[in-house]
Amino acid sequence: MFSRIFSRYPALPVAAGMPAGIIAVHYSLFVVVCACIAAACLLLARLKVRPRHIAILASSAIAGGVLTYFMKPPALPAEYFDSEERTYTGIVQNVRTSERSQRCYLDVGGDTAFRIAVFIADVVPTITPGDIMSVTGVLEVPDKYADVPTLDFGRDYSGRASARMAVNAGDCRVTGHDTSIMTRLQDFRGTIADAIYASPLAPATSRLLVSATLGNENPGPAVRERFRATGLSHLLCVSGFHTALLATVAALLLFPLRLWPRAGRYRHLIVIAIVWLYALLTGFMPSVVRAAVMISIYLGAKISERDAYPLNSLCIAVFIILAINPYWLFSIGFQLSVAAVLGLIAFANKLNPVPRRLGLAHKAASLVAVPLAALAGTAPIVLMHFHTLPLLSIPANAVAALIFQLFMAGGAAVALLSALGLPMGFAASCIDNLADAITGLCDYLAAIPGAFTSGIYLSTPNLLIFTAAIICLAAMLHLGSLRHKVCFATLAVILGCCTGCSNSERNTKTDFMVNAHGRDADLVIRNGAKGTTMTLTSRPAADYAAYFGRAGISVENVTYRVPPKYLTLGRKTILIPNGDRMLPHRLVDVIILTRQYRGRLDDALDRTSARTVLVLPEISPDKRKEYLDICSRRGVETPDLRLHPYIDNF
């Protein structure tokens, strides 16, 4: 049986070995993953799988590891992260704009070429891909927030950044623009976006259309959260859905070529060219490349009059994408794209109760079966990254799949025809109504109680158990023997119950985090899903109740006295001393030293018995060394805020 599987899907060992090799080199589990690869090869040999498939599995794992090793971002010396401000100049890449901020990558040249992930806390100056920009700020290590729970600060490995930086608008200056070929393509994408904004479409509609078709715009946190709550967030980013829609429209427009026997075959080649031009225009996003490869294989099989197996096409697409950039393996978009297609392959046809021969009825039933299959495939990825589960994604996708196709095709037609000078006022109003209908649908479904389950934090073992339950369910649907179906169905139920009954970590505890960025530092208070931030490098406002009210913490449970500043959070007490006055005898848990403190740290430790001392980066290097020596001599913990934030609960 296994030999038949590998013979039918020859790219399967490649797709399995490539990610394994990448993970083995990137993570510290090198020995474990290598042992798993070796065990898999031995198992396949025991199952009498052909030796060439075993060789492909092992060689692709080695190739993936080698590619990742040579594509690793350069590790910067420690002196780059000494909390000193410096100016860096480079070319802007991958700009993401929200209503109040901008995010981009800055490719810095020179003797040590590296990439910085830059967060700009403003929308001015407006930056575009290809801009030559100078930024002044303090570099942070790229994985500084990798271990911070519940915060979207984790390192984006797919960006291959060697450092990160948070700056204000005044710290950035655009000095020129790059003229390379890729930059010109990005500029052309911006020109198309400008044409959409100049059309009679409403601003909100234009922004939604640009985000869905070009992928270089952020529709805003409110719209994004609405779509995420109903499981429609894939419509806001360029994905396989949009690529398949483009290929379908192109094939319909080229349908007259089928009237000529020879030209009919070239129709598929033209569609393939259009799809890859779209992939080039969108900057070769992983989801678009994956869809383009699968569409090319499918249409290529039609040209050669052969069968194309979707799973084999997906495996080839995975190999090509990871060969281009191995770090895309750690991209959430890539993971969701592959998982969604796997879900469609495993569940879509089996969950559709209407046979294909009934035609229109089968397609109507697919409006429910396809979203359900995609949800089953992506559920582990969604829980791992977003800790949510949109329960109403199935009916939402069934309705939105029809409306959004009309919205995209009609919006593109309105933008094109209006650019040619044709009056499109009535058509634009119709498209605006479609956009309002989509957002209204999201609002209606999100308002239903229990529609959006958030705060689900499964541990790694529980997540693996949940994934195994889905795999058993897929196996049950595809097996022909009734005995095997019952066995796998029972196993799926048992694993599902184990996932639900086990202790899943939910975001219900209250904690605090001291985070330093540059020479500034903040105290982040979190209570469940709520949170607030207090600055530590300037004098906080006297009305501290407003801070904790935003985090949902009752002020009766918090005491905050100045001077000195004692902040009591539940059972934990934080001391922020200032000046050189003698501190009273009082037990505290954490002392935060700012540049306002000029007292004797030995006396402070004697009077407070603090177990942790946090030295903010704003303190001079000489004072920092003095404080660290005292703490080291007395055995007091002194976490380096420049490398990792300090987290504790109360």
Image (cartoon, rainbow, N blue to C red):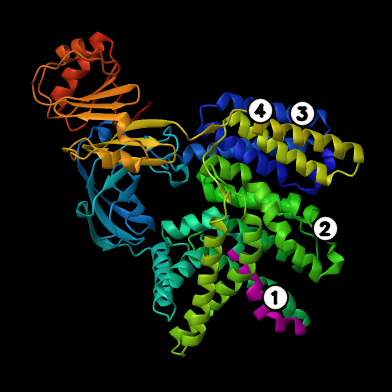
Under circle 3, the secondary element is helix
Query: Given the current orientation, which residue lies at the most extreme front position?
Result: 556
Q: Main secondary structure of the magenta part?
A: helix
Q: CA distance from mark 2 to mark 1?
A: 36 Å
Which one is in front in this view, the residue at disc 2 or the one at disc 3?
2
Visible residue check, residue 55: yes
- For the residues labelled 4 and 2, say whether their Cβ atoms are less than 8 Å apart: no
Using the image, determine if residue 331 lies above or below residue 132. above
Q: Which mark is drawn over residue 43? A: 3
Which quarter of the figure is the N terminus placed in? top right
* Residue displayed at 32% across by 48% down: 118
Query: Given the current orientation, which residue lies at the most extreme bottom position?
Result: 422
For the residue marked with disc 4, what is the amino acid? Cys
Question: Which residue is denoted by mark 1 in the rendering?
Answer: 266
Question: Which residue is denoted by mark 2 in the rendering?
Answer: 353
- Sequence-first tag of 1 and 3: 3
For the residue marked with disc 2, what is the amino acid? Pro
- Sequence-first tag of 4 and 2: 4
* Residue displayed at 52% across by 44% down: 386
- The answer to which image quadrant residue 22 occupies is top right
Q: CA distance from mark 4 to mark 1?
A: 46 Å
Q: CA distance from mark 4 to mark 2?
A: 39 Å
Question: Which residue is denoted by mark 4 in the rendering?
Answer: 36
- Sequence-first tag of 2 and 3: 3
Indicate whether residue 250 is drawn in magenta. yes
Under circle 2, the secondary element is loop
The residue nearer to you, when weighing 554 against 355, is 554
Q: Alpha-carbon neighbours of circle 2 within 10 Å: few (<14), some, or many (≥20)?
A: few
Question: Range of the magenta residues?
Answer: 242-260
Q: CA distance from mark 4 to mark 3?
A: 10 Å
Q: Report the side of 606 relative to 423 (left or right).
A: left
- For the residues labelled 4 and 3, say whether their Cβ atoms are less than 8 Å apart: no
